[in-house]
Amino acid sequence: MNFEPAQTPENPLLAEPDLTTPLQISLLPKNAQTKIEFSLILPTYQESKNIPAMVEKLTSLLDGRMPGKYELIVVDDNSPDRTWEVAQALMPEYPQLRVMRRQQERGLSTAVIRGWQAAKGEILGVIDADLQHPPEVLFQMLDAVDNGADLVLASRHIEGGGVSDWSFIRRVLSRGAQTLGLIVLPGVIGRVSDPMSGYFMVRREAIAGKTMNPLGYKILIETIGRGNIGPIAEVGYVFQERQAGESKVTWKQYVEYLGHLVRLRLDLWHFDRFWRYGLVGFSGVFVDMVVFYLLSDPSTLAWGLTRSKIIAAEAGIVNNFLWNDAWTFADMSGHQRGWRKRFKRLLKFNVICLAGVILNVLILNLLFNLLGINRYLANLIAIGIVTFWNFWLNLKLNWRVTEVNNK
Ligand code: GDD
Ligand code: MN
């Protein structure tokens, strides 16, 4: 694919981000010399007919409230109707307008995040560029942030909200998607009345450092799911009719939404990390058994059973620690280098695992002696429960705590 060079030097486009940089928003540098407080992203695809009116409307509103303290960032995905070029031509008239033309990456959610990465404000917002999200609502949203909300969304489903001309099917699909989301991600979808909204703003510090991994359209779910979002406020709005162009929502966005729910659900369960932890646990059982054989078997050293078991169990624990530190929790231990910190983690890991051994024995006795469950099934259940126990305690008390202490 041949990429056309950036356009006229007097209206420079924002550089397309390096795609190897993670989708992560960082805190502004302490000495950031900027007056910009609010950055509003306008993701566009085929919006050349809407963008002039949208920029004009936003400017007249925001100039009245915060002149010189806001910026509008159009993030266009190389629209065939050259929306990026239309927006670029507006820059001389609207000095607070910036434009990014993406030629390598595509998608509404990533467009918003890349816009936030280029933003200078402490408050990061997103609004559709097709005039369907009434800009007037921005003032109430900014007021809510000033009053302490971490995130404010414009909702169609509270007082003052509504949708203008949505078909019955679209309404059912939207509500259906929301209901499904409530089942899969109650702690995220249940926090707001309109999780499908693409019109909201969030404090930069509430999402700084969190790597986003969105799919499709639903940037709000990703923001609430992965961010450190405290108070959330909502403002009612009526979703307007489109003035020009058409909605890009197809069945593909609904399929992507399902994938997004599953991905976020597994990530919030630390599923990826948990199956690594389980795999490491298996390797530990293998090490334990080999050491136990070498020490206690009559054909080898024939040491006493208890002494052999204690040494073998410790060998298994050290094995598990080394793998978990270097692989399962690598993203966290990477911030806490140094032998002293590592040895401290090993000690904590030992204490948690030894407490796990005691818990294992207690559960085994409960299941086998009290409930009469087959000893091997009882042992398997006990090992399963203790694996969860060890994983969560190590995640919360070992790797994560030392990460926090390290800040
Ligand atoms: N950069 C970029 N890349 N922008 C996109 C893309 C894309 O792939 N797809 C859509 N957009 C832009 C459109 O140009 C428009 O500004 C905005 O995202 C919304 O796209 P629409 O296709 O108009 O969506 P909709 O109006 O049917 O639904 C919108 O509103 C709903 C209610 O808030 C979307 O924001 C939905 O996510 C939202 O649920
Ligand atoms: Mn629209």
Image (cartoon, rainbow, N blue to C red):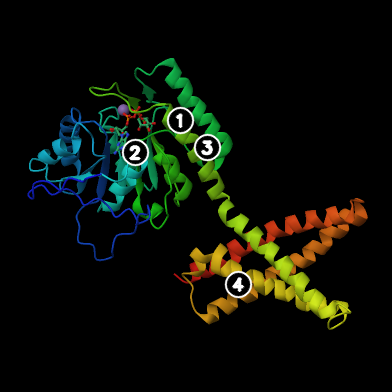
Upstream in sequence: badge 4 or badge 2: 2
SS of the residue at dot 2?
Answer: helix
Q: Which of marks 4 and 2 is in front?
A: 4
Which residue was labeled with disc 4? Answer: 322
- Residue displayed at 53% across by 81% down: 339
Which residue was labeled with disc 2? Answer: 108
Is disc 1 surrounded by few (<14), some (14 to 19) or many (20+) residues within 10 Å? Answer: some
Q: How far apart are labels 4 and 3 at the CA level? A: 39 Å
Query: Which kind of residue does numbered mark 4 sit on?
Result: Leu
Upstream in sequence: badge 1 or badge 2: 2
SS of the residue at dot 4?
Answer: helix
Task: Answer yes or no: disc 2 within 8 Å of ligand 1.
Answer: yes
Which residue was labeled with disc 1? Answer: 254
Circles 4 and 1, Cβ within 8 Å, touching? The answer is no
Is disc 2 surrounded by few (<14), some (14 to 19) or many (20+) residues within 10 Å? Answer: many
Query: Which kind of residue does numbered mark 3 sit on?
Result: Gly
Q: Decide: is 71 above or below 300.
A: above
Q: Position of residue 335 (x, y in %)?
A: 46, 70
Q: Decide: is 148 above or below 85.
A: below
Circles 1 and 2, Cβ within 8 Å, touching? The answer is no
